[in-house]
Image (tube, rainbow, N blue to C red):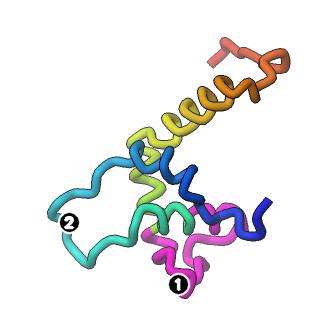
Amino acid sequence: MTTRPWIVDDDLWALIEPLLPPWPERSPGPRPVSDRLCLQGILFVLHNDIAWQLLPLELGFGSGQTCWRRLDRWQKAGVFDQLHQLLLAELNAAGELDWSRACVDGSH
């Protein structure tokens, strides 16, 4: 495991980037922080269990508020559900899932 698990490598980014909704052509305000940097900021906050407003600006991930807004936008667009399905399919195709330990719950 890397010492900085919030850093998204090129292979993982190649899977995630096509799932992200396009940025509006005419958005007000300054040029947005790149999606990849925002994702790394989100992962930094989650990994370190800190409040969004404590995300250090000097890391270059944008503000905590910027990262939170991007997380909210992506969640509403279904990005994480799609990514989950994609990763499960890839792991299954590689024979890396042990389905003998799967549990199905029909109550939801």
Tell me where residue 26 sits by quadrant: bottom left
Stretch of the chain drawn in magenta: 42-66
Is residue 20 shown left or right of residue 107?
A: left
- Secondary structure under tag 2 reads loop
- Secondary structure under tag 1 reads helix
Disc number placed over residue 27 in the picture, else none: 2
Q: Position of residue 100 (x, y in %)?
A: 84, 15
The verdict on residue 63 being magenta is yes
- Amino acid at pointer 2: Ser
Position of 61 relative to 16 (above/below):
below
Which residue was labeled with disc 1?
A: 57
Q: Residue at x 52, y 42 (%)?
A: 80
Q: Position of residue 103 (x, y in %)?
A: 77, 18
- The Cα atoms of the two marked residues, 2 and 1, are separated by 22 Å
The residue lying furthest to the right in this view is 101
The residue lying furthest to the left in this view is 26
Q: Position of residue 18 (x, y in %)?
A: 39, 45
